[in-house]
Image: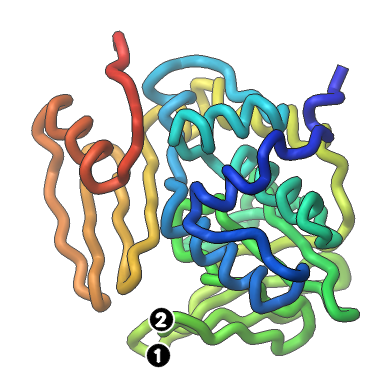
Amino acid sequence: MYEGFYASIPDPDAYLRRVGLARPAQPDLEFLNQLVYAHQRQIVFENLDGYLYRRPVSLEIPRLFDKVVTRHRGGFCFELNALLTQLLRDLGYSAYGCMARIVRKRDFTPPARHRGILVELENRLFFCDVGYGGPMPPGAVPVEEGGLLEAHGEAFQIRKADPYWWTLSRTTHTGEREDVIQFNTFPQNEVDFQVLSEYCSTSPDSVFTQKPFLNRRLENGSLSILGDTYVRTENHVATSRVIQSQEEFYRILREDFELEAPLASR
């Protein structure tokens, strides 16, 4: 029934071409960092299926591959992190999904409704994420007390939150530290994310069915859409404007996010 969740990537080289990379000589940390960063640059975090098209999201690898690689779309955490996890496995990495929660700008403990990626490499464990619509580490962060990734002008740190959970935080350009994500390291089976994905993509109570969320990393910043607000951040300077029409919305999708998103009937 769930065989597609565990299928191999139909064409790993096509997936790598989608993010502008070639197959590595070996599965090492250097390539892992390149892959995570390139993925965030080329494949958009977006919830158009849940919000705009009102159609189910599939976590089966062949269907995710068709959506993201063949049809040049993006996806949200349960899709993008699932697809990348399988690509990593097919390239020879030891990778699995983990349960996570978004804690950025929250003063309470939210439900665990996010998926991350853990990679066992060189006798260490690393956290990766290409499926969050906010600030993501541009590479792999060591899962250890004081684990640090400094890359592309950003700094992300990991610390132990309690006996079961780790906290990922980042240092902003002003020098402040903010918590972003919490995750545990218990290996999850692919089917463990099905119910959460279905809730997030179909429930009227989910934020992902109420407004559009899009995010794309730039070399020196990011692009984002939240509701009707479009924000372009470059060199830590953000400019925002309200999207005035459906025509403008689709133009931004095509030209800035490079998404092949057909018009919706809604």
Does the residue at mark 2 contact the one at mark 1 (Cβ under 8 Å)? yes
| Circle 2 residue | 172
Q: Position of residue 123 (x, y in %)?
A: 90, 80
Residue drawn where x is 46% and y is 65% of the image: 135
Amino acid tagged 2: Thr
Q: Position of residue 138 (x, y in %)?
A: 52, 71
* Residue closer to the observer: 4 or 235: 4
- Quadrant of the rendered image containing residue 94: bottom right
The vertical placement of 208 against 118, above or below, is above
The vertical placement of 147 against 230, above or below, is below
| Circle 1 residue | 175
The vertical placement of 202 against 249, above or below, is above
Residue 95 in view here? yes
Residue drawn where x is 39% and y is 61% of the image: 217
Q: Secondary structure at mark 1?
A: loop
Location of the C terminus (image quadrant): top left
Amino acid tagged 1: Gly
Q: In the displayed structure, does residue 248 sit left or right of residue 204?
A: left
Q: Position of residue 26 (x, y in %)?
A: 77, 70
Location of the N terminus (image quadrant): top right
